[in-house]
Image: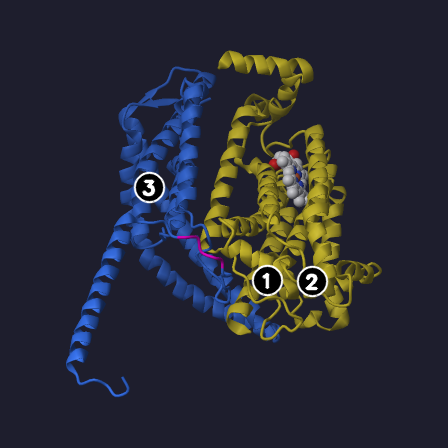
Chain colours: A yellow, B blue
Amino acid sequence: MNALFQQVYDFVEERIGLKTLEAKLMKEPIKGGSRWAYVFGSVLLFIFIMQAITGMLLMFYYIPSADHAYASTQFIIHEVDYGWYILSYHFWGSSAMVVMVFAHMSQVFLWGAYKKPREMVWLVGLALFGLVMAFGFTGYLLPWDQRAYWATTVGVEIMDKTPVIGDFLARFLKGGPTPGQMTLSRFFVIHVMILPGALMGLAGLHLFLFRSAGPAGPFRGTPDELKAKTDFFFPRQVWKDIMAMGVVFLIISTLALIEPVQLLEQATPDPGDYHPEPEWYFLFLFQLLRWKVFSGEFGQFLGAIAIPGLFMLLLVALPFIDRNPERNIFKRPIALLCWAVVMIGITVLTVSAILNREFLD
Amino acid sequence: MTPSPEKTPSVKLAWAVSWSAFWTGFPLKLIVALLLLAAGINPWEGGGLIALLLVSIPIDIWALGLTARTVFLERLGLDIDAPVGFTLWWQGAVLGGLVLGISYYAVSGAVDVGKKVAAGIIGLIKKVFPHFPIAEQITVELLLWTIPVTILALVLLLIWLKLFGWCIKRLIASSGTTSSASYFERVRQWDSARVPDDVGLMITSFGAAMVLVTIAFWMVLPVTTPHPHQDYQMPEVSKPAKPMKPEDALKKTENSLAKAEAILASLEDAKSKESKKPERKGK
Ligand code: HEM
């Protein structure tokens, strides 16, 4: 057995140089040793791969037409063997992806890993963040129930308010005056072709840039101390990454079993007594738009487009504004305060939106 | 280099041991919970909860033993000659029960005080911003009174850690021996506490266990949704012929034969009665 394995290994080694590849992939030095804080990026890759696998399985049965999308989704839930579990895993996987993106961004922000020479890693990361949110937005329409239809209607209306490109963007996404077959086709293609392709390409670039700059490592400790504790990527970091992936897999599966996907009524252009509401990770924005200051045409533009847009621009500019090489978060009080304010703000708005939905509306 | 056990703060020591022990045991418990859920048993209540707690005991003992030995070796340079996992587990559990008992009363008191203070602060905010939306008000209020409650919970956790740290120090004092090995040899030593010499065997058995768990999971997992949509109607599909069961078939034949016999008998009976009757008209 071992001899056979050795022969196969030697065969491949002679042709593609496995040893150098292995050395490049596994022997990457990690300053200061392996850490649990570094698992988030790898976990994101893992969740993405699982989304791709479960998504392909769903596509075996799903029909992206306004006449059949709802029925085929119901068919997946009620009749395809284990279809309900695969769909529910895909659903909860998308939430896990958003949570992990926030965790990963927080980690690299708090560790000061966006600073020189990792500005480009950060910028590509921001593009990846946009892709993850776009995945959620486009996937939400596909089951074609009331929730899907109305969240999309509201979402596209909000986009329409963007200056210059808004009108084009909304018309391009809708493909007609009201959401219908054209919208579904476009969202489907974006969700299963364009976004996965873009994410794979950009994630590759992200990793290439990350490897070129090298991991930032801990923000404390003298160079000598860090050097003494430096370890290779394999085996300790690989082990930590695998354990984190396992735990994330178990948590997503548990959620899929506790709260499996259930559809509402099939989409109709009449909301009836249904209150349109986006997926939970857009709820904070949705809640913000209910504030008095953001009512009216200009207010809506301010809350839905200007503030989030400026915030993203600020994140883009961050590595170029914050040029202080200090990485220790406890010596960057403004950064720590800003992070806490953003996190508390998002939490308060999200909880408020849920309270509104459950008790007040 | 290596700090002496007496000088290491007991809270820090207890945290190092219990935090990593928690994460060591957590994935295993999650697997058990997932299997229970897939089998339609709720692991957060009743029998499911009891099963989960029972399974957790050996997992916790094992995890505590592993992480405590690692911490002793790596940070303190100590070998321990005692059943570390079991000793620390029961001591930690007793202390945990004690602290939980106290916290039950302390936390509910803090919640009351916190709520009053939060209501006061909200009143102030409303004077400045009279149009503060109601949902945000409730959320901020929730946040305001959870802060003191969280602080109290942290203090209680610290008390538990302090007490648990003392237990750990006592254990070290009674059965710890200083290891003469260098830092790197010790690292190798605690690596091999996790990874046995025969890596092939470990990977095989680990893989086999994963395969078994996976098979068990798919076997208990319901094939179609446990929460069907109330409007969804299963389309009529021509049902495949039921498999034939000889015993049932025999019984059925016997039944219908008996029925036929009964009908025959009643017919004959009727006939004989009829023949006794006077002849009908028209015949
Ligand atoms: C699908 C989304 C993403 C994937 C798959 C991904 C993947 C990864 C991976 C595997 C690493 C290597 C080490 C680590 O995990 O810390 C990494 C590092 C990094 N990522 Fe991401 N990432 C994503 C999104 C983001 C976002 C949204 C940002 C920030 C805006 C970001 C910024 C960074 C930075 C600055 C590093 C360097 C960290 C260091 O040097 O310690 N990434 N990413």
Nearer the observer: mark 3 or 2; the answer is 2
A317 within the magenta span: no
> A218 or B204, which lies in front?
B204
Mark 3 is on which residue type? Ser
> SS for tag 3?
helix
Tally of marks: 3
Give how far apart the Cα atoms at labels 3 and 2 are.
46 Å
Nearer the observer: mark 3 or 1; the answer is 3
Residue located beneath label 2 in the image: A155
Residue located beneath label 3 in the image: B56
> A231 or B35, which lies in front?
B35
> SS for tag 1?
helix
What is the number of the mark on residue B262? Answer: none
Query: Do badges 2 and 1 share one subunit?
Result: yes
Give the image location of residue B198, x and y in percent: 41, 18
Residue located beneath label 1 in the image: A349
The residues colored magenta run B237-241
Q: Is residue A276 above or below residue A123?
A: below
Give how far apart the Cα atoms at labels 3 and 1 are.
37 Å
Magenta residues, dominant SS class? loop
Q: Residue at x 31, y 41 (%)?
A: B55
Observer able to see residue A126:
no
> SS for tag 2?
helix
Q: Quadrant of the C terminus of chain A?
A: bottom right
Q: Residue at x 56, y 52 (%)?
A: A91
Mark 1 is on which residue type? Leu
The chain under label 1 reads A
**Quarter where residue A349 is shown:** bottom right
Using a 10 Å C-alpha cutoff, classify the residue at mark 3 as few (fewer than 14 neighbours), some (14 to 19) or many (20 or more): some
| Residue occupying the far front of the picture | B283
The chain under label 2 reads A
Give how far apart the Cα atoms at labels 2 and 1 are.
18 Å
